[in-house]
Image (cartoon, rainbow, N blue to C red):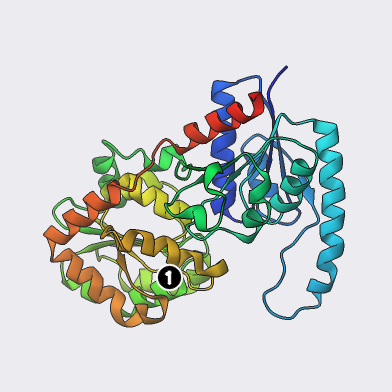
Amino acid sequence: MSLKVLISGGGTGGHIFPAIAIANTIKKTHPDAQILFVGANGKMEMEKVPAAGYEIIGLNITGIQRKLSLSNLAFPFRLIGSLIKARAIIKTFKPSVVVGVGGFASGPVLRMATWMKIPALIQEQNSFAGITNRWVASSVQRVCVAYDHMDKFFPKDVILKTGNPVRENVVQIEGKKQSALAKWNFTDAKPILLVVGGSLGARSINQALAGDIQRLIDAGMQVMWQTGKLFADEAKVLREKHKGDPVVITEFIYEMDLAYAMADMVVSRAGAIAVSELTIVGKPTILVPFPYAAEDHQTMNAMALVNTDAAIHVADKVAALELVDEVLKLNNDRTTGDRLKDNMRAHALPNAAEEIAAEVVKIARA
């Protein structure tokens, strides 16, 4: 009987890209496997998953608002409707195993799968477990995690530390530095700072750079700065202002492998997948966590590295005052940079997709 895998969840790239990586790895080892995704209508998985070549079905499910909201009154009805639809999907597709990656759609699908005695696995990306995964963890066969001490959220006997699946092409940086330098007209003679804040951009990081980038230029640094689309108007003005300077200011970096390959140090948010990529590429990094992420999980992700001397932390609220100072300090201290790089690489778990895929197959065959 062929392997049939139902993968549920999404909402953000941090959930979707690991899910697709797991699916791709399963297809490599089991080409005849049938894979179906379940997501939340209106969320980015409904676009990204079909673009990756997989079928997806949407549920009319949203999260509970953390502030008082009329939409919360409709949540129980949406949840019940999603549970009913999830049951119908499972009965029709008849999966060998169900995988949950977190996000709105994951809860109803995993809950219904466990009620129907379908083997199930959770992949938790963050160091502070999401509410959906905590809700169903006691009923699944395996929880794959990326951080230590996750037994405060999940039963100890089902935890397996695998790391987070990352996009292979992004972290394969060997031998790419010279082509990266040529692409963006940088030189190997001066240090390069890579600044990334996600596709929308990180407001605090952008404001810190906008106000102080001249200090970096004056210190002999080159800057590759992804501003995100919400900073596009300001970025246009800054590009004009710094024309001729060793600075590339762009809304989005499509060739992240090249950007990582040439970077001497990185400033980044602390989303789970960004952190996992950074541990694999092994760059001295300053993390500025987004403080409004659910349960402040980005700060937790950052501190898991900071507490092992693998990264530097700058709080979002003080980034405008302290970020550029920290960059200049790190640029002038090669010993600290080398230590951060070594300690960062000690956290790397580059085979996460393979390990999780193998566990999915093992559970399905049990």
Q: Nearer the viewer, residue 185 or 98?
A: 98
* Quarter of the figure with the C terminus: top right
Q: Is residue 258 visible?
A: no
In this rendering, is residue 144 above or below 221? above
Q: Amino acid at mark 1?
A: Ala
- Where is residue 132 drawn, in percent x and y? 66, 57
Quarter of the image holding residue 42?
A: bottom right
Q: Residue reaching furthest top?
A: 1
Residue at (52%, 36%) from the top-left corner?
356
Residue at (76%, 41%) from the top-left corner?
113
Q: Is residue 72 left or right of residue 15?
A: right
Quarter of the image holding residue 359?
A: top right
In this rendering, is residue 68 above or below 153? below
In this rendering, is residue 213 above or below 229? below
Residue where numbered disc 1 is placed: 235
Q: Is residue 225 left or right of residue 151?
A: left
Residue at (18%, 70%) from the top-left corner?
329
Q: Dot 1 lies on which element?
A: helix
- Where is residue 159 drawn, in percent x and y? 52, 44
* Quarter of the figure with the N terminus: top right
Number of residues whose C-alpha sits closer than 10 Å to that of mark 1, classed few (under 14), some (14–19) or many (20 or more): many
Quarter of the image holding residue 293?
A: bottom right
Q: Is residue 255 visible?
A: yes
